[in-house]
Amino acid sequence: AQSVTQPDIHITVSEGASLELRCNYSYGATPYLFWYVQSPGQGLQLLLKYFSGDTLVQGIKGFEAEFKRSQSSFNLRKPSVHWSDAAEYFCAVAFMEYGNKLVFGAGTILRVKS
Amino acid sequence: DVKVTQSSRYLVKRTGEKVFLECVQDMDHENMFWYRQDPGLGLRLIYFSYDVKMKEKGDIPEGYSVSREKKERFSLILESASTNQTSMYLCASSRASGRAWQFFGPGTRLTVL
């Protein structure tokens, strides 16, 4: 079965430090890839998406992600974290062979310390 | 501004009650989804609909049913609520095309006592 793994449940970074959140998926075909962010008590907001083409994609709020086919990974990065980035981040994958339904990772909770 | 709205942000129900969660989108999207979110488990798909009156089971449909009588509205029904259905419920919608992404509502936190 398709699965998405976010190996880090919690991450704490200092404000101004760089950030990388990891995401791996288990399927051979090229999927569509997404990162969503959820602030406390809110729904999910799309940060960025990858369908095809350039494997480095830019998103909102200064985030970027890189698709690495050989590693089945789609890691999220930000060069300098702001306190307002504290939230939960979800990686999601849509597998075309399964009707483009999204499969979500378990999420990574980001804490930012000042 | 495009929107997915959910009828309640917080809901408290008793075991055995019938519960309706309503979701409305204003983007004329073909697809609509209901997810359940639990800590450490991410989002799990309960049901989805790709057209009016059409529905398909997701990964965890047991104990739930859905209704889609109009394109913009997708309802989740708990026929007889149980305590293990205490959770956050998120509705989403998307276009039908392959290169589409889902827009989410704010969620309904349901507590079943």
Image: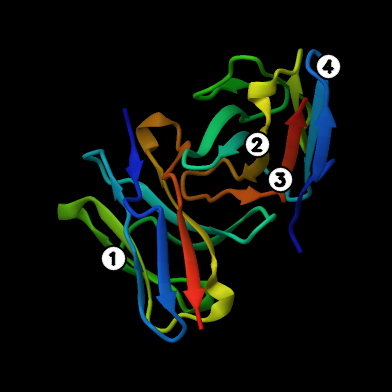
Q: Chain of mark 2?
A: B
As drawn, the label of residue B32 is: 2
CA neighbours of label 2 inside 10 A, class few (<14), some (14 to 19), many (20+): many
A103 lies above or below A57? above
Q: Which of pointers 4 and 2 indicates the residue nearer the eye?
A: 4
As drawn, the label of residue B67 is: none
CA neighbours of label 1 inside 10 A, class few (<14), some (14 to 19), many (20+): some
Q: Which residue is mark 4?
A: B17
CA gap between label 1 and label 2 equals: 29 Å
Q: Secondary structure at mark 2?
A: strand
For badge 2, the amino acid type reads Met
Mark 1–mark 3 CB contact (< 8 Å): no
- Residue A46: x and y in percent read 55, 60
Q: Which of pointers 3 and 2 indicates the residue nearer the eye?
A: 3
Q: Secondary structure at mark 3?
A: loop
Horizontal side of A105 relative to B75 (left or right) equals left
Horizontal side of B66 relative to A10 (left or right) equals right
CA gap between label 1 and label 3 equals: 32 Å
CA neighbours of label 4 inside 10 A, class few (<14), some (14 to 19), many (20+): few
**Which quadrant does the N terminus of chain A fall into?**
top left
Q: Are marks 4 and 2 on the same chain?
A: yes
Q: Which residue is mark 1?
A: A55
Q: Which residue is mark 3?
A: B107
Residue sticking out furthest to the left: A70
- Residue B106: x and y in percent read 72, 51
For badge 3, the amino acid type reads Gly
Camera-side residue of B60 and B110: B110
Q: Secondary structure at mark 1?
A: loop
Closer to the N terminus: mark 3 or mark 2?
2
Mark 4–mark 2 CB contact (< 8 Å): no
- Residue B28: x and y in percent read 73, 45
Q: Secondary structure at mark 4?
A: loop
